[in-house]
């Protein structure tokens, strides 16, 4: 289960160097992610990787999406965490 960080600059623990990370846009409270096709998918593998929180914010504002959050997704899900999208 992903953690929600109230302070994004605070350290979130250590993780193994070299772990791949994706920044996904997800529906709040659901396991649905924005797909590369523009629809929603339950598959993280099919989800669009925004690479950064700022890219998530830009997309969310441009498309006027509500009730979404940014998921930092790692190969090992114990390191996953969520940032709120205002």
Image: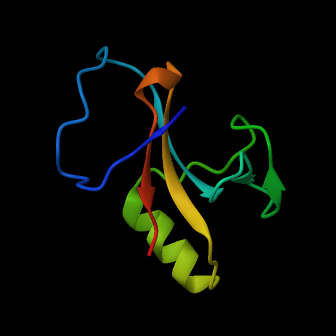
> Residue 39: x and y, percent?
82, 62
Residue 77: x %, y % from top left = 52, 24
Q: Nearer the viewer, residue 3 or 8?
A: 3
Say if 53 sits above or below 76 in the image: below
Location of residue 54 in the rendering, given as x and y in whole percent from the top left corner: 38, 66
In this picture the colour scheme is rainbow
Quadrant assignment for the C terminus: bottom left
Which residue is depicted at the point 57% across and 84% down? 62
Residue 43, position in %: x, y? 77, 38
Specify the quadrant that holds the N terminus: top right
Q: What residue is shown at x 46% (from left), y 68% (from top)?
A: 85
> Eyeballing the image, is 34 above or below 43?
below
Q: How many marks?
A: 0
* Picture residue at 62% right of the left edge, 77% below the top: 66
Compare residues 13 and 44 and report the one nearer the observer: 13
Work out whether residue 39 or residue 83 is closer to the camera in this orientation and state it: 83
User: In this picture, is 71 found above or below 45?
Assistant: below
72 relative position to 17: left or right: right
């Amino acid at each position: 289960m992903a953690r929600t960080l109230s302070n994004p600059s605070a350290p979130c623990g250590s993780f193994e160097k070299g772990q791949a990370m994706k920044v996904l846009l997800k529906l709040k409270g659901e396991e649905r992610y924005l797909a590369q096709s523009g629809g929603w998918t339950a598959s993280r593998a099919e989800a669009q990787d925004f690479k950064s929180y700022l890219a998530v914010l830009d997309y969310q504002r441009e498309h006027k999406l509500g009730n979404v959050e940014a998921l930092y997704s790692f190969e090992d899900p114990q390191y996953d965490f969520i940032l709120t999208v205002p």
